[in-house]
Amino acid sequence: MSWQTCRVLNPHQLQRLESIESLTRERLEQLGKTINLRSTNGFQSARDTLMRGVGKDTMDALRGEVGLAILEEEQLLRARSAVQKEASNRATYALLAGDLVGICIILALFAMFLGISCC
């Protein structure tokens, strides 16, 4: 599904996806800086940076946004499934009613053919 389709179907989720994308870029940037720090200043410097929690807030925010996106999609799926099930039930009832009417017509024609009167 394209971003444009998502915008039409669920603009709220599109905003969330844009936030996830932004947080992901930010986190990757932080990781890149930590890797660069490791390359230039050594392991201890990179370790100290990680131990100070650099990137933790970003990662927590990212996990939160992804969790909310999943929750909303699950809710939408449940709602769509309920609508689909109701439509399927209506179609089944319509087919059964049509079958019943057809059987009644066949029985009436059969009775007429045999000359049976119901009165």
Image (cartoon, grey):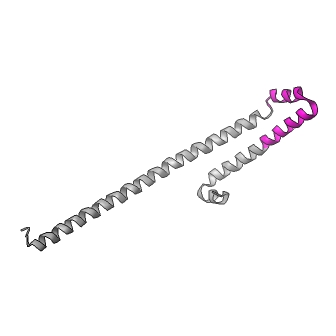
Q: Quadrant of the N terminus?
A: bottom right
The residue sitting at 60% across, 54% down in the picture is 10
Which image quadrant: the C terminus? bottom left
Left or right: where 46 falls relative to 83 = right
Say which quarter of the image contains residue 32: top right
Residue sitting at the far left:
119
Write the residue at 81% across / 26% down.
51
- Counting from the top left corner in percent of width and height, residue 90 is at 36, 57
Which segment is the magenta one? 26-53
Q: Is residue 24 magenta?
A: no
Question: With respect to residue 115, does 21 lie above or below?
Answer: above
| Residue 26 to residue 51: above or below | below
Left or right of 69: which side holds 90? left
Which residue sits at x=79%, y=43%? Answer: 26
Q: Position of residue 6 (x, y in %)?
A: 63, 56
Secondary structure predominantly adopted by residues drawn in magenta: helix
